[in-house]
């Protein structure tokens, strides 16, 4: 079994200047026996300095990352850079092109495929190229997400709570530099194999985001993504301070209890009873599930199990048992 990736790029990561190119992933399809997937890759380098590795489109239906990274790739001149910026605006390219969270090629979630392997399906092969070629070069890793089609979010820069206090304080410092309303500490309740989790496990300062959702997608959210990434690059010293946009200080909040993530007990139509930012008490109804097949049945009431405020809410009314409908967060020091 091979341990070397069959994916490759023609770009030279050590060359000064700006290069637009691709990560090429060998493919064979019904309509092209011999083909490559062309995943956009941009390298901007100028002299010595830290390397920032930026991802968008890890989930295909979250377009804040792709649009923002394309803008940065076009607008940042090499002379403005000290060190290197590597941009991958559409990591799960087939999903970005299909407006789906998961890859339409193998049905897999890129953000559950890390670190991947060369003998994996295409999603895991791309993850493996990222893990073995790109992440080792990085001094900071940023993976831009939003709620996509299924969730609304208060805009946040986020991370897991990592064991190393120095890495944690470095991540919080960089997250605060973004200038988003919230710095959000979360736990994994829906599987492992996340890109940020893998980068964090290597000791890399790593930031994720939840910038909004498909229905919150607009100029304000996109400005927060664009300004925030430039602020983080300036905080790293990769861009000069004149690229910073001042912002009001973020609140640090966390959802670290399993019960902060409220899953629907039944399948049906979700009626939300709370807005983003609303305070909730233990036992307070946050939503209910209606049963269209049984008009006489009372809806099932979903109650908060922890106190705090609403950080995230389900955006799609039609809901399956076990879908996360509300996330409760609390302010921490
Ligand atoms: Zn995502």
Image: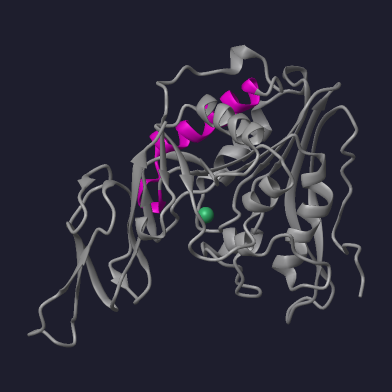
Q: Residue at x 70, y 19 (%)?
A: 237
Residue 175 is a magenta residue: no
Residue nearest the observer in this picture, 100 or 30: 100
Q: Is residue 90 visible?
A: no
Residue 289 located left or right of residue 128: left
Name which quarter of the figure residue 53 lies in: top right
The residue lying furthest to the left in this view is: 296
Q: Confirm whether the magenta stretch covers residue 233.
A: yes
Is any atom of residue 317 visible in this view? yes
Q: With respect to residue 331, does 288 lie above or below?
A: below
| x and y, in percent, of residue 119 in the image | 83, 73
Residue situated in front as seen by the camera: 52 or 204: 204
Spot occupied by residue 230 in the image (x, y as percentages of width and height):
59, 26
Secondary structure that dominates the magenta span: helix
Name the spot of residue 59 as percent of width and height, x first: 56, 57
The magenta stretch is 213-235
């Amino acid at each position: 079994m091979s341990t070397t990736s069959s994916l490759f790029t023609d770009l030279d990561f050590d060359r000064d200047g700006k290069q637009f190119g691709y990560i090429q992933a060998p493919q064979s399809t019904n309509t092209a026996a011999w083909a490559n997937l062309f995943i956009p890759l941009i390298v901007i380098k100028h002299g010595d300095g830290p390397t920032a590795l930026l991802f968008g489109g890890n989930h295909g239906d979250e377009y804040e990352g792709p649009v923002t990274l394309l803008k940065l790739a076009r607008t940042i001149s090499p002379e403005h850079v000290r060190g290197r910026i590597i941009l991958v605006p559409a990591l799960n390219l087939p999903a970005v092109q299909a407006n789906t969270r998961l890859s339409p090629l193998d049905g897999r979630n890129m953000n559950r495929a890390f670190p991947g392997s060369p003998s994996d399906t295409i999603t895991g092969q791309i993850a493996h190229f990222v893990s073995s070629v790109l992440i080792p070069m990085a001094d900071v890793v940023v993976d831009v997400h939003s709620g996509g089609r299924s969730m609304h979010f208060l805009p946040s820069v986020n991370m897991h709570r990592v064991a190393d206090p120095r890495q944690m304080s470095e991540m919080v410092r960089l997250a605060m530099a973004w200038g988003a309303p919230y710095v959000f500490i979360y736990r994994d309740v829906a599987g492992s194999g996340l890109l940020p989790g893998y980068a964090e496990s290597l000791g890399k300062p790593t930031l994720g985001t939840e910038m909004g959702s498909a229905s919150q997608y607009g100029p304000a959210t996109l400005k927060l993504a664009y300004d925030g990434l430039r602020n983080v690059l300036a905080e790293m010293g990769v861009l000069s301070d004149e690229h910073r946009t001042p912002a009001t200080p973020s609140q640090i909040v966390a959802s670290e209890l399993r019960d902060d993530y409220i899953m629907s007990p039944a399948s049906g139509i979700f009626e939300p009873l709370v807005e983003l930012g609303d305070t909730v008490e233990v036992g307070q109804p946050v939503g209910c599930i209606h049963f269209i097949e049984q008009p006489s049945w009372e809806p099932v009431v979903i109650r908060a199990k922890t106190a705090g405020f609403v950080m995230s809410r389900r955006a799609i009314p039609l809901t399956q048992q076990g879908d996360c409908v509300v996330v409760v967060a609390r302010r921490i020091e």
